[in-house]
Image (spheres, grey):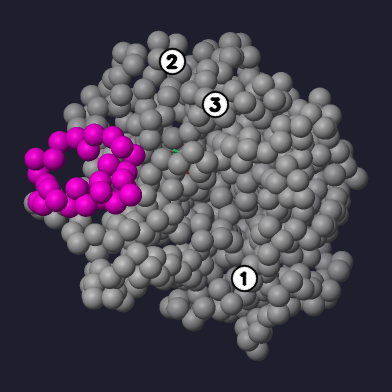
Amino acid sequence: MGYAEFHRRSLEDRDAFWAEQAKLIDWETPPQQICDNSNPPFTRWFVGGRTNLCHNAVDRHLGARGEQPALIYVSSETNEERVYSYRELHSEVQRFAAVLKSQGVGKGDRVLIYMPMIAEAAFAMLACARIGAVHAVVFGGFASVSLASRIDDATPKVVVSADAGSRGGKVVPYKPLLDEALRLSNHKPGSVLLVDRKLAPMEMTAGRDHDYATLADRHQRTTVECEWLESTDISYTLYTSGTTGKPKGVQRDVGGYAVALTASMKHIFLGNAGETYFSTSDIGWVVGHSYIIYGPLLAGMATIMYEGLPTRPDAGVWWSLVEKYKVTSMFSAPTAVRVLKKQDPAFLKKYDLSSLRALFLAGEPLDEPTAKWIAESLGRPIIDNYWQTESGWPILTVANGVEKKASKFGSPGVPMYGYDVKLVHESTGEELKGPDQKGVVVIEGPTPPGFMQTVWRDDARYVNTYWSSIPGRQVYSTFDWGIRDQDGYYYILGRTDDVINVAGHRLGTREIEESISSHPNIAEVAVVGVADQLKGQVAVAFAVVKDTSGLTDEAAKLKLEGEVMKVVDEQLGAVARPARVRFVTVLPKTRSGKLLRRAIQAVCEGRDPGDLTTIEDPTALQQIKDLVATR
Ligand code: AMP
């Protein structure tokens, strides 16, 4: 079957199509109804079916490949390398599940995981899935304030963390950040499990903090069976940034996610049982959930979990892993490729990469020079794929597992099966059917399996944020601009909202602004994303200072800039730190007081700021222009 027909069937013959895909996983009770869309936009998949993600990712493979590698853990930070077979993974996960149970965790309870890239993070996630607990993984690069708001939203019974991570050979302590977050949060979890890597000292709070290894020792041989869950039960929440300062908990189901990922491994990622998958992402992001942990394991593959930089000990480290473990599919982000592009290309030629079928890239726009460079250097297909935390798996790409289709530079590809993607006019809501017309990329419901169910504990926010932004129609907005060519390939042209994308990490400018405003000498601030050659975008802040008496020279300004950056580092984490903080006397706003972020961004990128008839004070933009000119 050609891909066009495959895609058509997925929409027009939806139930039959997905009933077939559902056979790719094990069910304790098969689904009674495939798609229930009686209460849009809350689509329910495989209703009545009972299954378990951990069973499908681990236990299911014990018979055929118990002794084959499942998790390959590599840290170039601590020089650890360990291969866990499916059988060993099964034991580790049961041990973790037993410890969670001993702390009172049961079905539906939340477990917040704030971990560096260590194998225990994978055990913890799979253990939650095993017992029906809901995991909420928070990216280890976030600091106390970000973490505290997520603790308050998820209200976890248990937090799982570690003494420290490591980056570029530098120890990054986690425990003090966690302690500060727990001091700031209103919700206090009953217990904190800590994996001690012996990288940094930990101050333990008696009665609350427990050494994981000590508890695990008591459960060397404990068996913990998989809890059979309803397909529509919650598997996890994952926080993502939007236009408000408060992060949204993207909530996912069990059965739909298991089917969607397993199908995507076959149709999109070309992964077969017994082969090796290597995704360079982090478990704190959606790619880490879907394609470091669940996807490859669901497919019976070995998955590489890598802690460290792509350039340490040298820029060949990833390729050496491809050679050593005969990686067949690799998944990374354009920023990482841009980093490698600056290094000696000889590193790419040093290793035997013949096992590699394709390199998949996602998370941010893939620019043509980067795509061309890596395609030529690797001599393998480079497959761009566009998706979001919300979707859980690709929305646009090419499904080479169904039919070989050429990629086009600059385009992630065509709509994936299950996705009814459209372009609509921003203000009229009219569908743009012709080629080369710019519109908002939207998805017509019902959303496919694996797609978010709702915003955790906030159905109204799900509807109001995602499904109500296009006038006159209830469609899901991606908040991305796009165009489609005559062959049906889409091109993504950037966000319609105030979300920025720094090195593939999604950040809300509002969150950064709130953090900067907490500095005692900042009256007001605007943060915008500015194009950057390496990171795609970087955050740049323009701030109005309360007391300017000390800001007499450049040195004083640089000092305040450093202080503001430190506030962001401490509250949100270095990942959110603006590249520059510049000082102005007034910010460009409309007469009704709305910040003109897009005009600021245009000026920073040397573009025309567009229509400024509504601007309150035209000198405001001139100040920014002057600053940008002086760099
Ligand atoms: P996240 O939820 O962090 O994965 O961020 C999703 C956003 O990243 C999307 O809405 C896009 O703005 C951007 N994005 C992700 N993948 C791509 C891609 N392949 N091409 C262009 N933009 C992308």
> Could you tell me which residue is drawn at 72 percent across and 61 percent down?
169
Residue 593 at what x, y percent from top left? Answer: 14, 55
Quarter of the view holding residue 207: bottom right
Residue 18 at what x, y percent from top left? Answer: 56, 28
In the image, residue 479 sits, relative to residue 432, either above or below, namely below
In the image, residue 608 sits, relative to residue 153, either above or below, namely above
Is 607 on the left or on the right of 538, as rendered?
left
The residue at label 2 has a CB less than 8 Å from ligand 1: no
Name the residue nearer the viewer: 182 or 346: 346
Instruction: State the residue lying farthest toward the right.
Output: 67
- Residue matched to label 2: 488
Say whether residue 484 is magenta.
no
> Could you tell me which residue is drawn at 34 percent across and 39 percent down?
605
Quarter of the view holding residue 248: bottom left
Residue 328 at what x, y percent from top left? Answer: 76, 30
Secondary structure state at the residue bearing disc 2:
loop
The type of residue carrying mark 1 is Tyr
Secondary structure state at the residue bearing disc 3:
helix
Secondary structure state at the residue bearing disc 1:
loop
- Residue matched to label 1: 174
Span shown in magenta: 603-630
Q: Residues within 10 Å of mark 2 (few under 14, many from 20)?
A: some
> Could you tell me which residue is drawn at 56 percent across and 47 percent down?
286
- Give me the disc on residue 415: none
